[in-house]
Amino acid sequence: MSLRPNARTEVRRNRYKVAVDAEEGRRRREDNMVEIRKSRREESLLKKRREGLSSAQNQNQNQNQQQNQQLASSFNSSSTSALEKKGFSWF
């Protein structure tokens, strides 16, 4: 019951990795690559959004600090001039 070499190799080839079909394997790989690309894209968008928010917050904080400094300086100058008019002096 000997098989010819060509027939034997054909049988072995047909039995090798029977569970994985070539088309099925290709489809799975393509699906996996699509999922990987989507996740990378989402990560990069989230990173850009976080950077945008942090820079906007920093700008708002800087503006608030400048406004506070301007208010403080205007308050100090107006209060000292009003006190000096009344004859008071700090020194």
Image: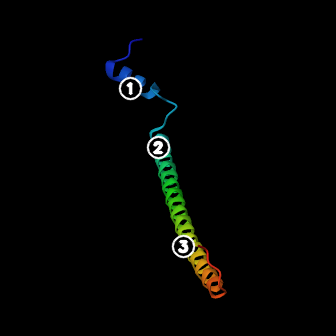
Q: Which mark is drawn over residue 29? A: 2
Q: Which of 89 and 57 is in front in this view?
A: 89
Residue 10, position as x, y percentages in the image = 38, 26
Label 1 – label 2 distance at C-alpha: 27 Å
Label 1 environment density (alpha carbons within 10 Å; few <14, some 14–19, many ≥20): few
**Helix, strand or loop status at disc 1:** helix
The reply, left or right, for residue 31 in relation to residue 80 is left
Residue 80, position as x, y percentages in the image = 61, 80
Closer to us: mark 1 or mark 3? 3
Q: Which mark is drawn over residue 66? A: 3
Residue 72, position as x, y percentages in the image = 60, 75
Q: Which of 58 and 23 is in front in this view?
A: 58
**Helix, strand or loop status at disc 2:** helix
The correct choice, above or below, for 88 with respect to 62 in the image is below
Residue in view at x 44 percent, y 39 percent: 22
Closer to us: mark 1 or mark 2? 2
Label 1 – label 3 distance at C-alpha: 82 Å
Q: Earlier in the sequence, mark 3 or mark 2?
A: 2
Q: Earlier in the sequence, mark 1 or mark 2?
A: 1
Give the residue type at disc 1. Glu
Q: Earlier in the sequence, mark 1 or mark 3?
A: 1
Q: Say how the picture is coloured.
A: rainbow
Where does label 1 land, which residue? 10
The correct choice, above or below, for 4 with respect to 73 in the image is above
